[in-house]
Image: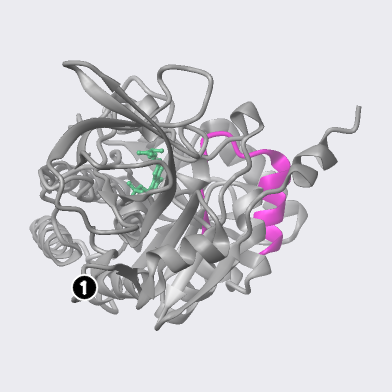
Amino acid sequence: SSTVARDAEGVATVGGIDVKALAAEFGTPAYVMDEADFRARARAWRDAFGEGADVYYAGKAFLSKAIVRWLHEEGLNLDVCSAGELGVALAAGMPGERIALHGNNKSPDELEQAVKAGVGHIVVDSYQEIDRLAAIAAAQGVRQPVLIRVTVGVEAHTHEFIATAHEDQKFGLSLSGGRAAEAVRRTLAHPSLELRGIHSHIGSQIFDTAGFEVAARRVVNLLVQVRDEHGVELPEIDLGGGLGIAYTSEDDPRTPAEIAASLAEIVRRECAAASLNAPRLSVEPGRAIVGPTAFTLYEVGTIKPLDGLRTYVSVDGGMSDNIRTALYDAEYSVALVSRTSEAEPMLVRVVGKHCESGDIVVRDAFLPADLTPGDLIAVPATGAYCRSMASNYNHALKPPVLAVLDGAARVIVRRETEEDLLRLDIG
Ligand code: LLP
């Protein structure tokens, strides 16, 4: 993995700490995050896009107060999609104007809180929401900046559940059907809304730049249409997140610099062709920043060889801390980290402790044949959409998130306790 290193004796370390010592001090399962790696990835996005653009980290991938502070310090903005995420952002001191709010069905309460917090913009996603938000902003005496989320009609090559720009899904207002243009008309008609631009997000875990380029072209075309129809040049476009990361050695993701260069070029060219002033660009990477920065540390509990098939290795977590394998057929790798081994590799399936057979963490992988209960294994690239999608299935307690930096480890989100769960159960 990118964050687990081996020292000269083969001891697995992260951020200068022996992984075994982390397990001894904080227990397993645990998400272990490399703070320096997170900051470096955040900076790489900022540097790639430069001063003429804004990078909004997508908090849905993983959000905590420490993360918000790191983002703030590294000069990134934050995209939130619920009052809960907004609350974390504000609690950690992110200025309202550096926050954007998303969602296809934000509640009136959420809209009200966002307007009150002075968020930089709200991305509106339906006609009803345009009217609802206009009324809320008017009541607060505010002129609220908004972007309109459009559906650009791109078939992103990714899992169906995380593709979002084809026509038949719940997000956005369709460009081809004219609903996006109608949303522009309706937004411009509200004095309490300030239409700043257009937003598109085509999906997630995407490897080629082609889809982003088509989206950029279509969004700029809408800006041209808006200028021609209304005589206003909208100053911003947001092309969303979605850049894929390497979960296994087979994946070959694009870098932030590659994405930035191709988007800047397309926008520049399309605008020049239409004599349009180039809008300010923003992007919303989540997975590409936080995904590779963490691994999940598990302890092996049982080992069950199925003759001629594979060996089932059960760990002390499972689908409650990583639902991605069950939900999207996601692929992960795994490594033995508590010791070195010269034993032959054996084909394993890493499974959890939950009461269903789909409770798989790593579908196919190799671990040394002398694996024993008590060994520690690490599953890399679990920083995105694992803790944030964790559940209490079977009353599992959500694992802590540890941050390591320069040889020191600290808990940034503590492990849940049985009292935490019982406190909610007031019957
Ligand atoms: N912007 C918007 C409007 C989004 O909906 C998303 C992700 C992002 C940005 C960030 O996308 P990223 O850069 O992280 O790919 N739970 C799924 C992923 C769902 C993504 C939802 N929206 C998974 O575990 O693969």
Along the horizontal axis of the image, is 151 left or right of 352? left
Q: Nearer the viewer, residue 359 or 254?
A: 359
Along the horizontal axis of the image, is 281 left or right of 296? left
Q: Secondary structure at mark 1?
A: loop
Q: Nearer the viewer, residue 174 or 193?
A: 174
Q: Which residues are magenta?
A: 99-120
Say which residue appears at 53% left-offset and 74% top-offset: 69
Say which residue appears at 20% left-offset and 53% top-offset: 341
Badge 1: few (under 14), some or many (20 or more) residues near its Cα, within 10 Å?
Answer: few
For the N terminus, give its image quadrant: bottom left
Say which residue appears at 64% left-offset and 46% top-offset: 134
Q: What's the amino acid at mark 1?
A: Glu
The residue tagged 1 is: 9
- Ligand 1 closer than 8 Å to the CB at disc 1? no
Among the 4 quarters of the image, the one containing residue 211: top left
Q: Where in the image, quadrant-wise, is ligand 1 located?
A: top left
The x and y percentages for residue 317 are: 49, 39
Outermost residue toward the right in this view: 427
Q: Nearer the viewer, residue 392 or 227?
A: 392
Taking the magenta stretch, the answer to whether it contains residue 159 is no
36 is higher (above) or lower (below) than 252: below
Taking the magenta stretch, the answer to whether it contains residue 100 is yes
